[in-house]
Image: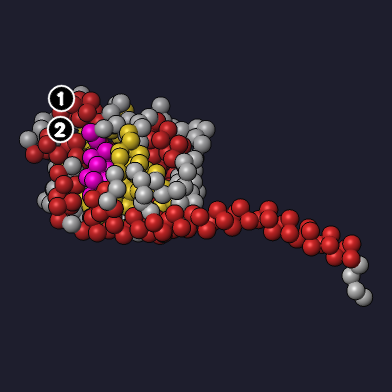
């Protein structure tokens, strides 16, 4: 039966209105793709969620300058410290996904949602992974004057078990990666030590050298000068492989803890919805930057090791570390102070 004229025109009008309503989304998508195709056309902001001068900031500036040279566009580092980087992360998660805002994720920021209540972001869901940039090794050190017979993990654990009261160790703070890494080692090794948290790595190392606390799980970049000066003794590194800065120091895995892996690391994130063309372009540029010997040497000088993973690999890395350390935090009842 032929459709009545009124019904036909009503249906046509409704379909036209629906098409017009959808048009802005279609045009917006096309516009975003066109913008991504000619990206970058203006300054790029690289947010660093820690103060200037630290390893995350230094690595960001090294790679940011190289990226600027390759893209022929300014890359400006924007330091926004606070709450293990969670303040900056909350802002970046809500930033315009136009390809002009990135953040250098570091392990403390990755794990912050497990340690701080009421954060407004989810590390796994609220960002677009771009590329990993560096590994920041961590190391177990002892004061050689306080513990002259402790030269490896076996002697450390034997000494800890022989104490009537738990042996003290320190880190840069409650919930710090050094704290979590030692708690994982204690769990795997079935021994106990008492955590004495400090507010920052510098005072913790100072008191370890001074003998107030005999053991520390420290960032290698901070501990290395004191190891080289003989004020601290390195007895194990947390990385799966030995590190180039301390080639004679065995890994924790080599010393009987198979599968132990504790590496602090950093990588670029973008706001959710950042065009894939932009993400892939930046990832490819970072891959080439990190392959340069000059970049590798500059990062080593800052205490970091160049380590590239593409967006998919970084996404898996984020998920795995978030789950692994989150479980330990819950098991141990750890909360940031």
- The residue that label 2 is drawn on is 143
Q: Where is residue 236 in the image (x, y as percent from the top left)?
A: 20, 46
184 left or right, relative to 149: right
Q: Closest to the observer: 136 or 87?
A: 87
Q: Position of residue 156 (x, y in %)?
A: 21, 40
Q: Position of residue 214 (x, y in %)?
A: 20, 30
**Crowding at mark 2 (Cα within 10 Å: few <14, some 14-19, many 20+):** many
Q: Residue at x 19, y 40 (%)?
A: 221
Q: Closest to the observer: 174 or 322?
A: 322
**Crowding at mark 1 (Cα within 10 Å: few <14, some 14-19, many 20+):** some
- Is any part of residue 39 visible from this angle? yes
Q: Which residue is drawn at 49% across and 40% down?
A: 94
- The residue that label 1 is drawn on is 210
Of the 4 image quadrants, the one containing the N terminus is bottom right
User: What coloring was used for the rendering?
Assistant: secondary structure
Q: Closest to the observer: 227 or 123?
A: 123
- Which contiguous range is marked in magenta? 53-67
| Number of numbered tags placed on the structure image | 2
Q: Going from the N terminus, do you reach mark 2 or mark 1 first?
A: 2
212 left or right, relative to 181: left
């Amino acid at each position: 039966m032929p459709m009545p004229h009124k019904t036909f025109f009503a249906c046509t009008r409704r379909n036209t209105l629906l098409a017009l309503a959808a048009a802005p989304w279609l045009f917006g998508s096309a516009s975003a793709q066109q913008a991504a195709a000619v990206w970058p056309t203006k300054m790029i902001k690289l947010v660093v969620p820690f103060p200037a001068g630290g390893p995350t900031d230094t690595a960001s500036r090294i790679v940011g300058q190289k990226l600027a040279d390759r893209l022929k566009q300014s890359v400006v580092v924007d330091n926004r410290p606070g709450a293990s980087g969670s303040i900056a992360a909350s802002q970046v998660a809500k930033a315009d996904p136009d390809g002009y805002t990135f953040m250098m994720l570091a392990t403390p920021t990755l794990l912050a949602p497990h340690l701080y209540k009421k954060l407004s972001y989810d590390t796994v869901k609220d960002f677009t992974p771009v590329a990993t940039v560096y590994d920041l090794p961590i190391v177990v050190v002892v004061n050689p004057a306080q513990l002259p017979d402790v030269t490896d993990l076996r002697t450390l654990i034997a000494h800890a078990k022989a104490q009537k009261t738990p042996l003290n160790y320190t880190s840069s703070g409650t919930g710090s990666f050094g704290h979590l890494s030692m708690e994982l080692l204690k769990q795997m090794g079935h021994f106990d030590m008492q955590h004495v948290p400090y507010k920052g790595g510098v005072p913790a190392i100072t008191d370890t050298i001074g003998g107030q606390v005999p053991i520390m799980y420290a960032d290698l970049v901070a501990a290395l000068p004191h190891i080289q000066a003989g004020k601290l003794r390195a007895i194990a590194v947390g990385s799966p492989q030995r590190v180039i800065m301390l080639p004679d120091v065995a890994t924790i895995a080599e010393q009987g803890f198979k599968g132990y892996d504790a590496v602090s690391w950093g990588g670029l994130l973008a706001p959710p919805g950042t065009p894939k063309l932009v993400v892939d372009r930046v990832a490819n540029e970072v891959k080439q930057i990190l392959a340069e010997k000059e970049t590798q040497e500059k990062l080593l000088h800052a205490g970091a090791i160049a380590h590239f993973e593409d967006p998919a690999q970084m996404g898996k890395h984020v998920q795995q570390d978030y789950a692994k350390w989150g479980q330990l935090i819950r098991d141990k009842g750890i909360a940031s102070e």
